[in-house]
Image (cartoon, helix red, strand yellow):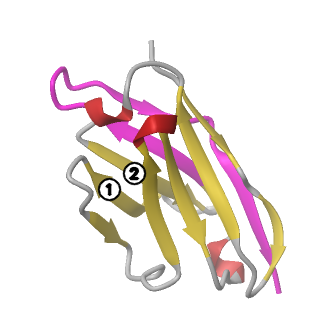
Amino acid sequence: QVQLVESGGGLVQAGGSLRLSCAASAGSILSFNVLNWYRQAPGKQREVVATIGRSGITNYADSVKGRFTISRDNAKNTVYLQMNSLKPEDTAVYYCNALRGADGWTGWGQGTHVTVSS
């Protein structure tokens, strides 16, 4: 059973940076068709922030374009979210998500808190 384990959250001042990591406990992240970062702010719905496909193609929510970068290290079985120029509205719990098309499996990490102070 694959588990996704996130790390890297914390408290940062506006304008600062954080890098989130999501490591897969088993198998290869190349087995996943899509890897996503979602976030959920208090009182709001969970929203997708960034996506990377198996081919390496990336997509971003308009609210983070130019500030966040999703990447992966296949050798480390890890996907990253580099967050720069952070704003208080980026405060949320960030979740890693993986989709595997071969069997329809999807998994979520436990979430990591990001708090941006003004």
Residue located at (75% from left, 81% from top)? 16
Identify residue type, mark 1.
Ile
Q: Name the spot of residue 67 as percent of width and height, x first.
A: 53, 82
Query: Magenta segment, principal secondary structure?
Result: strand
Q: Nearer the viewer, residue 70 or 103?
A: 70
Query: If the image is split into quadrants, where does the C terminus sit?
Result: bottom right
Residue 42 in sight in this render: no
Q: Is residue 93 magenta?
A: no
Numbered disc 2: secondary structure: strand
Side of 62 relative to 110 (left or right): left
Identify residue type, mark 2.
Asn
Q: Is residue 103 magenta?
A: yes
Q: Specify few, some or many for label 1: CA neighbours under 10 Å numbering under 14, 14-19, or 20 or more.
A: many
* Disc ID at residue 36: 2
Residue located at (62% from left, 63% from top)? 41
Q: Name the spot of residue 57 as percent of width and height, x first.
A: 24, 62
Label 2 – label 1 distance at C-alpha: 6 Å
The reply to whether the C-beta atoms of the residues labelled 2 and 1 are less than 8 Å apart is yes
Provide the residue designation for mark 1.
Answer: 52
Side of 1 relative to 116 (left or right): left
Query: If the image is split into quadrants, where does the N terminus sit?
Result: top left
Of label 2 and label 1, which has the lower sequence position?
2
- Magenta segment range? 94-118
Residue 56 in sight in this render: yes
Question: Is the residue 118 above or below the residue 21 in the image?
Answer: below
